[in-house]
Amino acid sequence: MKQVIKDSLIVCIWIGIGTLTLWGMDWFGLIASTSNVSNNSSLQVDFPAVYKIWKSGDAIFVDTRSASNFRKGHIPGAVNIPLNRVKHQLKVLPTNKETLLITYCGNIECPNAHQLMNVLLGYGYQNVKFFPRGVRGWQALGHALETK
């Protein structure tokens, strides 16, 4: 009986390791160079360019996470438009549809930034990109978050 329990535990450990490998252990987005959501580099912006854009104030950063996660910490100056609240939150975006918008989520594994980018393009915004590394990547590279 002890041997069966021991063997079962070993199998469970290997399944767990395999699962983490498949899901990706790069939660901060520091190892992977691109998001697993899209390979179209013209639609994404990453370090160091995203920081330069943020620093210059040439874009509006759009956080796709829930309002509670947004309040816990977001890229400074960002607005919050959760993916499931787009219609109700469009009023926080400028009326000029050529304004650069950069969507982001929690980390490189989250598809919401890419999805919101496509939704905003569908609403007529012409200059929308996504930041695949999101809040965790921003923070991991030493940039502060803002809380509300």
Image (spheres, rainbow, N blue to C red):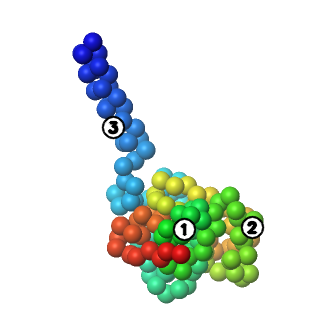
Q: Residue furthest top?
A: 1
Whether 67 is drawn above or below 52: the answer is above
Residue 68 x/y as whole percent: 56, 64
1 or 3: mark nearer the eye: 1
Quarter placement of the N terminus: top left
- Mark 2 to mark 1: distance in Å? 17 Å
Q: Which class describes the residues within 10 Å of circle 3: few (<14), some (14-19), or many (20+)? A: few
Mark number, residue 88: 2
Q: Quadrant of residue 130?
A: bottom right
Residue 75 placed where, x, y %? 49, 74
> Can residue 49 be seen?
no
Q: Which residue is mark 1?
A: 70
Left or right, residue 61 beside residue 26: right
Q: Nearer the viewer, residue 42 or 106?
A: 106
**Which amino acid type is marked by label 2?**
His
- Secondary structure, mark 2, is helix
| Contact, mark 1 vs mark 3 (Cβ under 8 Å) | no
Badge number at residue 17: 3
Task: Determine whether the residue tagged by mark 3 lies in a helix, strand or loop.
Answer: helix
* Distance CA(mark 1)–CA(mark 3): 31 Å
Amino acid identity at mark 3:
Ile
Amino acid type, residue under disc 1 in the picture: Phe
At a point 50% along the width and 71% down the height, the residue shown is 74
Which residue is at 61% across, 70% downward? 80
Q: Earlier in the sequence, mark 1 or mark 3?
A: 3
